[in-house]
């Protein structure tokens, strides 16, 4: 973790209440900042960097010029009332976000304490009770801020909430092992069974990820949902899905289900907001028919499967 984060606090980039996709029942999903992966299709590019950063919304800019006045790096200029940010110069000091009167520049990521997060999570405890819901930690990769994640999960359990961890599994086993003591359900991403292809598209190989998955099923009691984002020209082949099913059947105990998550473009505008080009902008979506075929294929292995979002 970067050393400007005090003990007992972490960096959160979103807290989403009334979530129904990230585990059973009604949930509050806490998104922690920072990810060791660099998936080309990532729909949360603002989650990758561990520290807070700025995101821009050009359509809201009223041309006040306050951001350019305060920027210590002279990274902001105006050309005929259009604000231009030189991202190479920006040092993420966040001063422009603090003075922008129209929220055309905002901060992504804020320091929060465990108590502050749990206070927000606890507001919906009646819904959790009625629906078997609870708190889900997501990201980025929540295990990158593992001490903060551990503190949140421990406190959530102390308050009687169901807990889920949404992870890409790229962490040291010792960390995962400790966090699992306070985790009821793991939502575990397996993006590709071929390590070289995994490395090409995410920046990391998959050996540690598959090894950790085996250990979770062998050594912990947490329930597991496998998540498979289905990405065009990357893993949208029956061959790789079959390899995943065969691997899942070798695990020490059954997973609850495999969720197939069709590729979407929700993140496209966020790349523009960070002055970046979305690498998947020309890629077509996966059809419902194809997702249906993949679902049947997983079912043919006797595994429970659904199509998520
Ligand atoms: S965050 Fe970047 S653009 Fe904004 S004031 Fe700081 S250096 Fe300038
Ligand atoms: S693991 Fe998730 S958050 Fe991290 S880069 Fe990949 S898609 Fe984005």
Image (tube, helix red, strand yellow):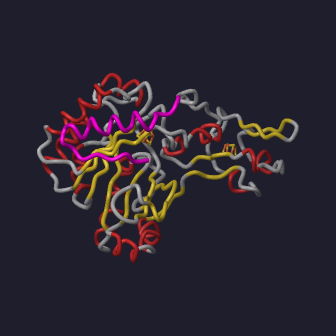
Give whichever of 94, 247 is nearer the camera.
247
Q: Quadrant of ligand 1?
A: top right
Q: Is residue 69 left or right of residue 118?
A: right
Residue 190 in the image, given as x and y percentages of width and height? 31, 38
Q: Quarter-wise, where is residue 155 in the image?
A: bottom left
Q: Is residue 24 left or right of residue 269?
A: left
Q: Residue furthest front?
A: 289
Q: How many marks?
A: 0
Q: Residue furthest right?
A: 80
Question: Which residue is located at x 35 percent, y 42 percent?
Answer: 260
Q: Quarter-wise, where is residue 98 in the image?
A: bottom right
Residue 145 in the image, given as x and y percentages of width and height? 39, 51
Residue 272 in the image, given as x and y percentages of width and height? 64, 37
Magenta span includes 14: no
Give whichever of 275, 67 is nearer the camera.
275
Q: Which segment is the magenta one?
A: 284-309
Residue 169 in the image, given as x and y percentages of width and height? 30, 42
């Amino acid at each position: 973790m970067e050393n400007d984060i005090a003990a007992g606090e972490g960096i959160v980039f979103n807290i989403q209440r009334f979530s129904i996709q990230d585990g059973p029942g009604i949930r509050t999903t806490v998104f922690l900042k920072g990810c060791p992966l660099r998936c080309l299709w990532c729909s949360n590019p603002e989650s990758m960097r561990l520290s807070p950063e700025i995101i821009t919304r050009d359509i809201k800019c009223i041309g006040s010029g306050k951001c350019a006045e305060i920027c210590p790096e002279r990274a902001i200029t105006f050309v005929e009332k259009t604000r231009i940010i030189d991202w190479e110069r920006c040092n993420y000091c966040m001063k422009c976000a603090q003075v922008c009167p129209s929220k055309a520049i905002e901060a992504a990521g804020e320091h929060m304490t465990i108590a502050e997060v749990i206070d927000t999570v606890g507001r919906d405890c009646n819904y959790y009770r009625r629906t078997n819901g609870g708190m889900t930690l997501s990201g980025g990769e929540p295990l990158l801020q593992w001490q903060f994640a551990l503190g949140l999960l421990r406190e959530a359990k102390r308050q009687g909430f169901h807990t889920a961890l949404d992870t890409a599994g790229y962490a040291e086993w010792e960390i995962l092992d400790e966090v699992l003591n306070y985790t009821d359900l793991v939502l575990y991403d397996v993006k590709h069974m071929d390590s070289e292809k995994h490395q090409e598209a995410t920046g990391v190989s998959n050996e540690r990820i598959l090894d950790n998955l085996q250990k979770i099923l062998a050594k912990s009691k947490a329930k597991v949902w496998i998540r498979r984002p289905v990405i065009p020209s990357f893993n949208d082949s029956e061959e790789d899905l079959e390899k995943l099913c065969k691997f899942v059947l070798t695990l020490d105990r059954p997973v609850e289900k495999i969720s197939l998550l069709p590729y979407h473009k929700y993140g496209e505008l966020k790349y523009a907001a960070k002055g970046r080009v979305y690498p998947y902008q020309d890629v077509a979506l996966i059809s419902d028919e194809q997702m249906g075929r993949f679902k049947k294929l997983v079912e043919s292995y006797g595994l429970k499967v659904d199509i998520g979002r």
